[in-house]
Image (cartoon, rainbow, N blue to C red):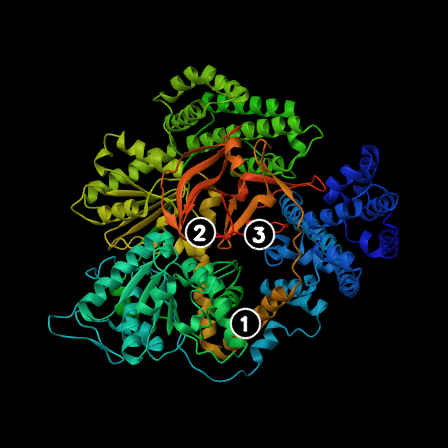
Amino acid sequence: MYEEEKENLKKFRNYIVQIIRPSNMKGFMTSYLETAVVEIILSEENRSVTTAAELLLGKMCDLVEMGWFQGFLDALLEGEYTGLYNAIKEWDFEEIERMSNYKKLLERIEASFTKQIKPCEIITHMTECFVSREVEEIRAIDGQKGHIAAAEKLVECLRRSDRSNWFKLLLLALEHCNYAELLQLLDPQTESTEEKMEVDMGTTTVVFQYREEAECGSSLNSANWNQAQEGSAGLVGGVTQGRYRLREYQKELAAPALQGENTLICGPTGCGKTLVALTICEHHLRSKSEAKIVFLATKLVVYEQQLGLFLEYFNSTNAGIRIKGVCGDMEDQVSMDVIVKGNDIIVLTPQILLNALNMGTVPSLSVFTLLIFDECHNATRKHPYNMLMASYLDSKLSQQGQVLPQIVGLTASVGIGTFRNSQEAEMNICQLCANLDTRIISTVSNNREELQSFVHIPEKDYVEVGKLANDEFVSIIRYIMVYIESQAKRWYDIGSLSNLQTSEHGTQKYEQWIVDVQKKCKVLQLEDKEEESRVCRALFNYMGHLRKYNDALIINEDARTKDALNYLEDFIQQVKDAGFDTIEQQLTACFDEKHPHLAILSQRRDRDNPKLTRLKFILDEQYTQDQETRTLLFVRTRALTEALKNWIEETDSLRFLKPAVLMGSLGSGMTQTYKKGVLQSFKNTSDQSKILIATSVADEGVDIPQCNLVLMYEYIGNMIKTVQVRGRGRAEGSRCILISSRKERIEKEQQNMLQEKMVEAAVDKLQVSRDHMLQMIENYQKTDKTTRDYEKSAPVNPRTVENNKFLCAKCKKFACFSDDLRVLKESQHIVLDKSIFDRSITKPHPRPKKYMGILKEKKLFCANCHEEWGIVASYRHLQNLPLLRIEGFVVESCVTQKQRNFGKWKEVTFVIKPFIVENECL
């Protein structure tokens, strides 16, 4: 049986053994080979991957068990060997053979290659060429052994790659990262950067100037919304501004867009870019008979703010302009085609428009005449902005004859991506322009003095403070964590589940290890299924507790011991309230035993956190000098927002600040209405709140004109985040201060400041080399279009019709069969088998609401371990529909018994039939 398959495996043996890595197919081996044989193969892999692959292939050719060949194919897919899977499926190795010459070339230059590249920089541009495990290994080796060792691993992985596009993506990655010499070695046809710059590329002139400073106010009455005297009007390009008149530097920013050019407007935060955008919209509406404008905002808080500004502006200047805002769940209330037809200006979050395009309710972007992208620096990679523009560019470059909308982007910084010098920054800027199809970057050049008189640059400062020394509280928490780890190891060797190295307790790396172990637990398989269920549930419980203790150590480092203990107390109480099992009883008992001692330690007065001491000093000093100060305090986590709020409220000299908190909606319980109220209250100088503690939700686009002190409490990011956070300080005399106990964070922030200068130099160079810029933009667009076309043409792995079991991701208890699933509106997955309610429990949904015609009513949980499975909803006349979330399950094939963990529904490998209301009887 399977004689033909065995003969073909032998025939193509040389190709196969040069690609597969047996440890990536461990599940297949343990199912069909004896344990001793598997151990021999894995042991050999440590010496030679190819020899181990030959051993595996030889043993496969001796198999007589039914289903082994299909099991092998499934293992290839699971191991991410898509190229080899397709080759074996069709017994066509032409693509694999075509890659051999590229691999030989890479082998020849390996010595030079490995000594020049920074692997972590390269792999970010070509992750699809690697198995997920390989990316982790390369990064781990880079961190442990350095660039050269990691580069050698990268070359080894590429030489075993079965991805047909790996060589092309390698060239693109080298070009992105400016490895000109290596490009020359791999592709002699490649021009060097210097040669490219000398080519004569045409003639179009634009003036560039770039500076980074302090966005316009949230009201049209703020300083940078210049109001004319009653009855007067300002004119810009034939546009009457009614009550509002542009300053000269704002006219300069608007000028190219008013001429109909695709324009990237780059102006410092606080300069009034939104008023510029409103002016462009008004001019566009007056100059086109059938104008249709979309204004896009990335965050809900910013969406609310900008929609309000549009309504305020056009209510005062043009009574007949129809404006509609759509965000989040609102897209279900009225069809997008109705909204588009019935309004002149639509303010949207980008995913709404992307959904409408995918569902066909908006046929194409050609129905609009102007698209404005707020915070347009986000138009990279898989961001909805970039996906929208990919659709735009595909239409344009395919010469389909569609009349496409004008594009305008707004940003405070064009310094996207990673770069080490102005030349690399220049390439990134051109990539952003290519993504947005903008040939002009409009900045203030002729009216700098006026700009500087209105835009206030916050003074930047860095405060390095001493670390809180480890004390008995930390020792006890670490003791509990070691105890939990030891208990987990009694159930299973958790060290074998993750390739990541366990790090010191109380670090983000330790949290990453926990997450990876939990991910691997989901697909852990044992012969005894009941034992498998118990082991997986136990490990999930242990890892969940470890994560909370790790969070507590981080809170203790940044806030008070009292806050860290409160965080743990809340968690333990939630566990007890949820009907905890034997393991959770054991773990909570361990905490209860240590709690009295921890409580005493948390009340000590002689161990103030140096960070809090310095923060208190800064606030005391600032409010002594100016009692009307408005402070934005940025922190990394939600837990820390609550900890610092409590600390301020319990500190005598700071209690008068009446702190408010702003963070993202997911999991925080903060509705959009609540967040809007928080912002409005903070902006109102007559209200009591003088300090707003916020996570990253407030660092981009949120306008608070009164803010004159920005504090970054262990809060850093890339260069654009530095610009955005600093720009929240709008008032004259503003300051921005980074407070950190970690020297590397301060150095990172200082590096961000230096990179701003690199971006300035890059724009200066583009100013005198415009032809070069246009050529780079064209090249990027062609390359990106080729990549998109390739991805679309690449064969999609066919989905199987086999049945699968859905098992709880935490305890592995059976939930339902995939044959009982139906998909509604391409995204909602309904279980037809009502017996799922016998294996689950429901609780009222905390925020019942309707989306896509589906009314969320309850949450659905595993009856055994309380893992969240999804929701219970109603649709039309149908009630009690269980809708599953794929993250809550492990999927086990009924044929091979192999388990897989899918992060998204679109990744599943089996067919799910459509839900047809008329045919389904529930």
Check if mark 3's residue and mark 1's residue have beta carbons within 8 Å.
no
Q: Is residue 683 above or below residue 443?
A: above
Count residues near mark 2 (Cα–Cα under 10 Å), then give few for <14, some for 14-19, many for 20+: some
Dot 2: what SS? helix
Helix, strand or loop at mark 3? strand
Q: Nearer the viewer, residue 845 or 618?
A: 845
What residue would you read off at disc 2?
Answer: 750
Q: Quadrant of residue 126?
A: bottom right
Q: Residue sitting at 18 percent across and 48 percent down? A: 685
Does residue 21 appear anywhere in the picture?
no
User: In the shown orientation, is residue 341 left or right of residue 810?
Assistant: left
Mark earlier in primary sequence (2, 1): 2
Residue drawn at 68 percent across, 61 percent down: 166
Q: Where is residue 668 shown, x and y percent of the image?
A: 37, 40
Type of amino acid under label 1: Gln
Per the image, the residue denoted by label 1 is 781
The mark nearer the N terminus, 3 or 1, is 1
- What is the CA distance from the residue labelled 3 to the residue labelled 1? 38 Å
Report the amino acid beneath label 3: Lys
The picture places residue 427, in percent across and down from the top left corner, at 53, 67
Of circles 3 and 1, the one toward us is 3
CA distance for labels 2 and 3 = 55 Å
Which quadrant holds residue 287?
bottom left
Mark 2: amino acid: Gln
- Is any atom of residue 239 visible in this view? yes
Within 10 Å of the Cα at label 3, are there few (<14), some (14-19), or many (20+) other Cα atoms? some
* Residue bearing mark 3: 913
Foreground tag (2 vs 1): 1
- Give the residue drawn at x 52%, y 62%: 421
Crowding at label 1, few (<14), some or many (≥20) Cα neighbours within 10 Å?
Answer: many
Q: Position of residue 759 (x, y in %)?
A: 45, 64
